[in-house]
Image: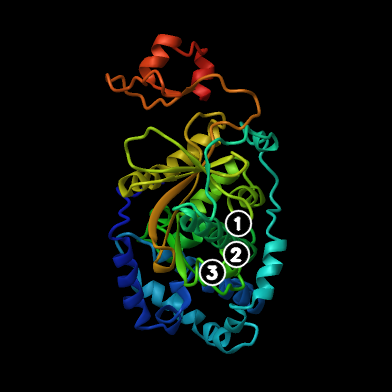
């Protein structure tokens, strides 16, 4: 399918706000709470599923269409929204609807049953998460660390976002049966590109300090350091979920490595001049790397091609990106855009040399004698080339 010409993170919020205003004139469902918080969307999807399974398909088509980068199809969106308005009104009034959103008992149920039922794909490196990487070396991000609030907010924000998206994904799959969602979407919105909508999608979650049905008590977990709400944006969750599946990463593995406030991230000390900072998960399997907007936009634009590449070449040495997020809010005193990546090292064998290869042979791409990480010119001096067979090179 044709990919979007360019992903624009800076202007995307204004585009979504314009859509909400235009379609919201005709629909209380769009005008009110539904699309302001991904937790509400997930909660409403469960409520709609229990009333009429087919409503979930309509809800998810409407949710996807709102991310069209250039707008359009407002009339079709409004008609779809009006079909959901009576269910939305019932959700707001029902004791089993909106009123359960802040029920912490529901969070405990979710926290105990968030294991991903999908089996790992037995391709490429998908089985490497069964091994135990070498423990990361660096500064532990504990409560005294300057980036502690970012770290703990990222951990629990990712958990809430991933759980909520999985709930919506499961409910939508159940409503589709054997039908193809993309085909139904293009039939309902012929002037929109399904892939463009996915590339431009961004779900925002408000994480309250007192906890909710989809998030724990942040104030208690952080011993009062987070005493107000913060937000996390989850970019392209459907595409990243597909990519994680191709890489053999289940939600359960993701949570156990990334989303555990009982263990700390480990800061990776780097000689990077970009000003970005890096964290390892406590088990060394994943890396959190802060990003600039143009880097994030480039990744989102490449995502469909990356998915296609891993489908045909699971052993590719392309970077294995698992998610793109942004956490922000006055209560955590930060506004950070960041990637989650699968760590290059997914084994317990000793590492003798480490190289940071960017594909540049400029004179600056040589490490100093006291630097542990080497660069391209050092590689050429040490090895010259990989010496791979042509078929192995193609696979990678």
194 relative position to 42: left or right: left
Which residue occupies 67% across, 65% down? Answer: 110
Q: Which residue is mark 3?
A: 224
Query: Which one is in front, 65 or 188?
Result: 65
Q: Which residue is mark 2?
A: 221
Q: How many marks?
A: 3
Which residue occupies 62% across, 52% down? Answer: 255
Query: Which one is in front, 361 or 305?
Result: 361
Whether label 2 touches label 1, CB < 8 Å: yes
Distance between the alpha carbons at the discs numbered 3 and 1: 14 Å
Query: At which x and y percent is residue 157?
Result: 52, 60
Of pointers 3 and 1, the one earlier in the residue sequence? 3
Q: Would residue 239 be visible to someone looking at this image?
A: yes
| Residue 293 disc label | none
| Residue 261 disc label | 1
Structural crowding at the residue carrying mark 1, measured as other residues with C-alpha within 10 Å and reported as few (<14), some (14–19) or many (≥20): some
Can you name the residue that lies furthest to the front here? Answer: 144
Can you name the residue that lies furthest to the bottom here? Answer: 93
48 relative position to 118: left or right: left
Structural crowding at the residue carrying mark 3, measured as other residues with C-alpha within 10 Å and reported as few (<14), some (14–19) or many (≥20): few
Query: At which x and y percent is residue 182?
Result: 49, 56
Of pointers 2 and 1, the one earlier in the residue sequence? 2
Q: Is residue 47 above or below residue 90?
A: above
Residue 98: name its quadrant: bottom right
Query: Which one is in front, 241 or 269?
Result: 269
Q: How is the image coloured?
A: rainbow
Structural crowding at the residue carrying mark 2, measured as other residues with C-alpha within 10 Å and reported as few (<14), some (14–19) or many (≥20): some
Query: At which x and y percent is residue 363?
Result: 27, 19
Label 3 element class: loop
Label 2 element class: helix
């Amino acid at each position: 399918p044709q990919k979007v010409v360019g992903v624009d993170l800076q202007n995307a919020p204004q585009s979504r706000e314009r859509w909400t205003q235009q379609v919201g004139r005709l629909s209380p469902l769009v005008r009110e709470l539904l699309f302001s918080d991904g937790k509400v969307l997930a909660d409403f999807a469960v409520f709609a599923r229990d009333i009429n399974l087919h409503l979930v398909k309509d809800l998810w088509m409407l949710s996807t269409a709102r991310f069209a980068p250039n707008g359009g199809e407002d009339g079709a969106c409004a008609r779809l929204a009006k079909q959901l308005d009576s269910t939305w009104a019932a959700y707001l009034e029902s004791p089993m609807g909106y009123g359960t959103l802040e029920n912490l008992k529901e969070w405990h149920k979710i926290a105990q049953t968030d294991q991903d039922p999908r089996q790992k794909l037995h391709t490429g490196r998908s089985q490497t998460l069964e091994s135990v990487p070498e423990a990361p070396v660096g500064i532990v991000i504990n409560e005294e660390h300057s980036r502690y609030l970012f770290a703990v907010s990222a951990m629990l924000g990712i958990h809430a976002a991933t759980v909520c998206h999985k709930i919506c994904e499961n409910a939508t799959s159940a409503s589709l049966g054997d039908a193809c969602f993309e085909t139904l979407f293009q039939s309902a919105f012929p002037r929109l590109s399904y892939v463009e909508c996915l590339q431009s999608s961004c779900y925002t979650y408000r994480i309250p300090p007192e906890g909710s049905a989809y998030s724990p008590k942040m104030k208690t977990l952080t011993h009062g350091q987070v005493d107000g709400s913060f937000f996390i944006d989850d970019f392209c969750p459907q595409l990243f979920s597909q990519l994680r599946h191709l890489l053999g990463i289940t939600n359960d593995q993701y949570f156990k490595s990334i989303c555990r406030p009982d263990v700390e991230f480990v800061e990776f000390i780097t000689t990077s001049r970009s000003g970005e900072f890096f964290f390892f998960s406590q088990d060394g399997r994943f890396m959190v790397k802060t990003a600039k907007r143009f880097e994030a936009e480039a990744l989102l634009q490449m995502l469909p091609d990356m998915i296609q590449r891993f489908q045909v070449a699971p052993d590719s040495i392309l970077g294995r990106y698992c998610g793109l997020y942004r956490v922000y809010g006055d209560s955590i005193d930060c506004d950070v855009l960041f990637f989650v990546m699968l760590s290059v090292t997914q084994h317990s064998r000793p590492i003798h040399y480490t190289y940071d290869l960017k594909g540049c042979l400029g004179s600056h791409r040589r490490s100093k004698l006291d630097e542990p990480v080497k660069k391209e010119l050092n590689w050429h001096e040490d090895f010259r080339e990989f010496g791979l067979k042509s078929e192995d090179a193609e696979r990678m």
